[in-house]
Amino acid sequence: MVSYIGKRLIYLMITLLVILTATFFLMKKLPGTPFDTERFALLPEAQQTQFLEKYGLNDPVIMQYGKYILNVFKGDLGTSFFYSGKPVNDVIFGRIGPSALIGTQAILIGLSMGLLLGIVAACWHNSGIDYFTMVLAVLGVSVPNFVVAALLQYFIGLKWGILPVAFWESWKSSILPSIAMSFGVTAMIARFMRTEMLDVLAQDYIVTARAKGLNQFKVLMRHAIRNSIIPVVTILGPIIVNLLTGSLAVENIYGIPGIGSLFVDCIKTNDYSTIMGITIFYSAFYILVVMIVDILYSVIDPRIRLAAGEEGQ
């Protein structure tokens, strides 16, 4: 297991380097500059040169790339152009809190509701709850989360006045964004769990367990759910990353000062350093979560550990 984790960490570093390199050179192709073009043009030539030298923008691109790579490995993501020279590390970590809160709540809501609906739908196949789950799954995949966010904002926030419409004032402000972001997650997990549960419940070992006298609850808990949850774990990795790092549309609709809205603002202003910093943060988090998901496979299903051991012999 230690050697496996070590190899994955090496792959993580190589993947990050490739992503960082591609993003850096693509970003240099963006039109415009991080500075206000009209105001920058009015500055004396000496001040323009001073600005460019301060941020290293007058160096050859390959030299800028080399300096940036070296600074990244030192833990320095550079200085933000848009936020008055503030370190990118501080800018990003100052926005993680709101995104992490609504993302965590969305994961908890989506995972609990999705698993519950999927299990119930499979146990009562072709019943009303089964049809409801399938309709919900179709809606969850078809309707974007920003549409759900706008509907919640109008009815629950504006028309009924139950929760805040927008802005980040208290914990209540996080409820509607979390529900909006969890809608698609609930539908996706419910669909996966239902499909896999139906397949597992038809297996011979389930029939054998029932023939031995185990009641339905024990059959579900000991055999069916545990063997059905692996596909859910597979899709849970990317879902966790997307939710915890913020939804671009939902955060902008509700005025949430999170990573998603920060990313949009930085793209609008060509804030190169912050764009790169968020890309590195998102990519590293994504790869790390995928690695953790792979490790969880062996915890959930011992057969995966056995197969890995046989391959290593």
Image: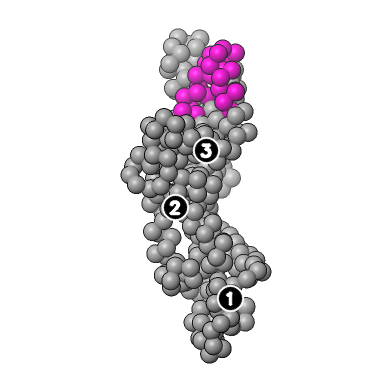
Q: Which circle marks residue 258 in the picture?
A: 2
Residue at image position (47%, 54%) is: 259
Using the rendered image of the protein, determine whether residue 80 is visible from the camera's viewpoint.
yes
**Residue at 58% in and 32% down:** 140
Residue 191 in view, yes or no: no
Indicate the position of residue 279 as horizontal and vertical percent values: 54, 60
Q: Is residue 219 above or below residue 47?
A: above
Q: What range is drawn magenta here?
A: 113-137
Q: Distance of mark 2 from mark 1, alpha carbons?
A: 30 Å
Query: Label 3 neighbourhood size at 10 Å, few (<14), some (14-19), many (20+)?
Result: some
What's the residue type where badge 1 is placed?
Glu
Secondary structure of the residue carrying numbered label 3: helix
* Mark 1 nearby-residue class (10 Å; few <14, some 14–19, many ≥20): few
CB within 8 Å, label 2 to label 1 = no
Relative height, residue 204 to residue 175 (above, below): above
Label 2, label 3: how far apart the Cα atoms are: 18 Å
Residue 54 drawn in magenta: no
- What residue is shown with label 1? 38
